[in-house]
Image (cartoon, grey):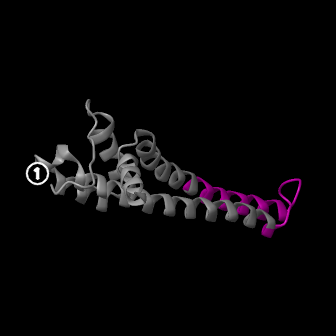
Amino acid sequence: MKNLLIDRDLTSLLNNPKLQAILAIVPVTLFILGLLSYFGIFFSMFSTIDAQLGHMGNSKSLLSALLGNLIIFIFLVLMSFFTGVISFVYFIVHAVKNPNLIKSDDRLLWIIAIIFGNGLGIFVYWLSQIKRKDPRPIIDLYTDEI
């Protein structure tokens, strides 16, 4: 009985549109925020060095300026990595089990796009194969069609 509940939950997770949207958008967004944080580290570092040389008013420690932004950067990179791995596995399974791709030869192309285009490939797959399809593909984990 417990296995039946887990099986039903896994199938419903693969067909949940909100989870699909989150897994497609969040890793890319976190990556972009991480890049902005990376540039923020250099901006704060150079502005602190400039202030310490006497070119500007208030001077704060270079270490505090660097560490404040570095902690944010490390957090964003780790969150981007973990959500990206979960998203990667999720959409590979989705592409393998997608009934719309079983009838055509597009499955291999989408799997390659997801693997090599990682974040961008996942986002494009979500837009074209899930979001814009009128009847959304219903994924059944326990069919023998591959």
Up the image or down, 18 lies above or below 70; here it is above
> Which residue sits furthest front?
1
| Residue extent of the magenta highlight | 35-63
Q: Amino acid at mark 1?
A: Asp
The N terminus: image quadrant: bottom left
Q: Residue at x 23, y 48 (%)?
A: 98
Element on which disc 1 rests: loop
57 magenta-colored: yes
Q: Nearer the viewer, residue 62 or 119?
A: 119
Q: Residue at x 43, y 59 (%)?
A: 2
Up the image or down, 31 lies above or below 104; here it is below
41 magenta-colored: yes
Q: Position of residue 11 (x, y in %)?
A: 34, 50
Q: Position of residue 107 (x, y in %)?
A: 18, 53
> Which residue sits furthest bottom?
63
> Which residue sits furthest right?
58
Q: Residue at x 62, y 65 (%)?
A: 74
Q: Nearer the viewer, residue 69 or 85?
A: 85
Up the image or down, 6 lies above or below 103; here it is below
- Residue holding disc 1: 105
Q: Position of residue 84 (x, y in %)?
A: 45, 59
Q: Residue at x 44, y 60 (%)?
A: 86
